[in-house]
Amino acid sequence: MNILERYHAMEYGPAPEARNEADAWLAARDFGKALFIGGDWKAASGGKTFDTSEPSSGKLLARVSDANASDIDAAVSAAAKALPKWSASSGYQRAKVLYAIGRAMQRHQRLFAVLETIDNGKPIRESRDIDVPLAIRHFLHHAGWAQALDRDFPGHKGVGVVGQIIPWNFPLLMLAWKIAPALAVGCTVVLKPAEFTPLTSILFAEICERAGVPKGVVNIVQGGPEAGAAIVNHPGIQKIAFTGSSEVGKIIRKATAGSGKKLSLELGGKSAFIVFEDADLDSAVEGLVDGIWFNQGQVCCAGSRLLVQEGIADALIAKVKTRMSRLRVGSPLDKNTDIGPLVDLTQLDRVKGLIAEGARQGAVCWQPDAALPSSGYYHLPTLATGVSPANILAQEEVFGPVLATMTFRNTEEAIELANNTRYGLAASVWSENVNLALHVAPQLKAGVVWINGTNMFDAACGFGGYRESGFGREGGREGMFEYLSAKLPLGPVIKPATSSAQPVEQADGVGIDRTAKLFIGGKQVRPDGNYSLAVATAKGKLAGEVGLGSRKDIRDAVSAARACKTWPEATAYNRSQVLYYLAENLSGRASEFAARLTELTGANAKAARDEVELSIERLFLYAGLADKFEGRVHQPPARAVTLALHEPVGVVGIVAPDNQPLLGFISLVAPALAMGNTVVAVPSERYPLLATDLYQVIEYSDVPAGAINIVTGRSAELAGVLAKHDDVDGLWLFADAETCAKAEADSIGNLKRVWSGNGRGLDWGSEEAAGDALLRRAIEVKNVWVPYGD
Ligand code: NAD
């Protein structure tokens, strides 16, 4: 054998990470008292425990206390007791505690990494170089936010006691993403880790003791779905932050409906990894290794769908296979290991089942010729080709080391394929042409887009999804808002509308009969059912009739809103001009609208004039802000910039209130339009003529057809239709409490973002009910990572 042959034949020797410190920690602890509540270590009151074992061998690691509902109750009480003092402490005091946590974690960095690897199965290289440093960075970064609250979030304060539920794939990192912002804003927390991976959270609780976190500020309870459900349903909790599967996310959305709890959901994904023909293929292959085989593919934002341009498909697939053959599958504690075991046997069986089903549906599944360790839940990296867009491997989140490949011909097809999923978490775009990449990124329905890169994260940059990948963001400024609330001045309690059938007396005098229709796709159209609704004046006479909209009309309106591309694609300057023009045209008819308000609501002349004036002012405000409520550029500690872009939510349904009916309608519709959303609005059921009188104003203000659609009728019924409609992306609801709760529960089909007044209106005349508070609800933040360097 010559030197070159020897060189090529060289194998890696074993490079195991020592585990004695971790074993000593495991041996010394009493896991039967693993609930960290009010600063004390407690056994589960029901005496139950669950086992956590080592995925690389199946061996038992610990028997851990399994919390029941009364333990959760104790944890919530401890958090509530600690809240007043913690929330009243100065930003500096909280910053010092967060800083102390970060520093203490740094001192025990290695123990955290080894424990994480033993408990979860992820390669030590990943836990040591990614999970733990990022978790520490989160605490150190948020120490700064604690002191910057008044500066950056004026008028906001922490929401209170927060319930947090996390998955097993990044146990410590997800804990950090949850606890750091909550503590920074002065919330106290009850956090439940996943039942497969409790260990690093227990070590973290020890760190809290040492870092001087006041008792009860951080409570960490162990357990499974039952403990999770007890957190979700606990009335003493003001916000639920959940990371996990879309399936459980939907259960939680339903369970919290009508409770007024703030909610953020970070759920699953089926992210596209798009390679254009001008990409640097070797870099793309390395990116792919990181994109799909990082953490054995058990990553919410795993690039599990490879979309490759036809001309380079064969070349890229050949390179991928060669690289896959070199991936080292083995002990996660070995520093040379690329792929460790999956977390549990159930997960391994699930992955095998999905691959078998994918193959049955026509995919060709290839694996490198390599041996697996004799014990443990290992699975070889798998490449599926010949995958049709409908194949289960292209649609379902596998959460394992499986890459599904499809090809595309041109940019439009790439975007279409990428968006052909119910999820919307992340995407990677590979092209040496930055113009092309930045052209594609905004068109992808995903909360995070990496250009020529993948799986880049930082505490300063928000992370989170669109569609069924959930709502809310973690990290960055947008992540802070998830734990903050600002007092919005409430309007009156909204009562359910009484039945319509009451006769309305004819008005005196005979004018020309005008029938208000619906406004859909830029046209006035008759309601599908051909029924109408009588509208009464303040004196109980007939003011007119409006169309009684139905499910079919909402469907048409949503189609028209979806089909309107010119509005979301218009420049912000353009949208601003149209909103100014609306204001101008409304102003031209101000006295007519004031008279209408007086006629319908009985408002005196001055109050009516003021409401119209304020409505015009609001249009002006949002016209002005349309091109000012912009995104930001972050500079994370990497050779990259992150563009935090503001994008419209999409099609937004609006159920407008009865109080201040013109101002309320405009206060909701204008910010949605300003940010580029298209709108399906249901005006006040009692005073719909104020909205139908706007048709002509809209018609001669250059609003593109479909940008705003108005369906009059029964608010509760139409709210229900909007809530269940899977092509509506957001729903803003000012209706009675029961309608709001029902709509929240009904929104789970596509996990649309619902903002509800929970049975209260707002005081639309107040300054707080205008501006950023509404604009923030009208956008999604998309973080586009653009690396730089040679
Ligand atoms: P899971 O939904 O089964 O469990 C997540 C957590 O919820 C666990 O702590 C579990 O005990 C708890 N839970 C289960 N049922 C519950 C219920 N009915 N009520 C309350 N809590 C309940 O998810 P998993 O299998 O642990 O994690 C994998 C999922 O997490 C994947 O879908 C992945 O994409 C997702 N994930 C998302 C992100 C993100 O940021 N978007 C990050 C990591 C993981």
Image (cartoon, rainbow, N blue to C red):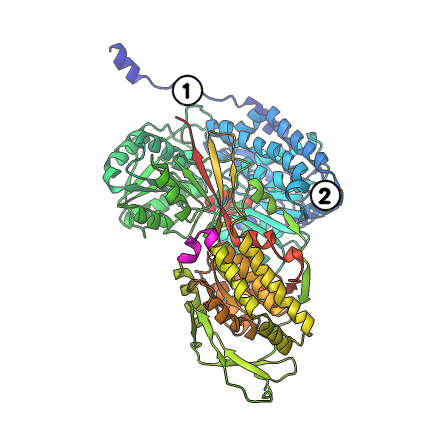
Looking at the picture, which amino acid does disc 1 mark?
Pro
Check the image and name the residue furthest to the top.
2
Label at residue 14: 1
Instruction: Report helix, strand or loop for mark 1.
Output: loop
Position of 294 compared to 416: left or right? right
For the point 56% across and 71% down, the residue is 589
Looking at the picture, which amino acid does disc 2 mark?
Ser
Instruction: Provide residue 335's location: percent of width, then percent of height.
Output: 45, 23
Crowdedness of circle 1 by 10 Å Cα count: few (<14), some, many (20+)? few
Say which of 144 and 676 sits in front.
676
Please tell me which of labels 1 and 2 falls first in the chain: 1
Label at residue 87: 2
Instruction: Report helix, strand or loop for mark 2.
Output: helix
Say which of 356 and 406 sits in front.
406
Q: Please tell me whether residue 494 belongs to the stretch shown in magenta.
A: no
Instruction: Provide residue 113's location: percent of width, then percent of height.
Output: 53, 28
Image: magenta residue range? 566-574
Position of 239 compared to 5: left or right? right
Instruction: Provide residue 441's location: percent of width, then percent of height.
Output: 40, 44
Q: On the rendered image, what quadrant is the N terminus found in?
A: top left
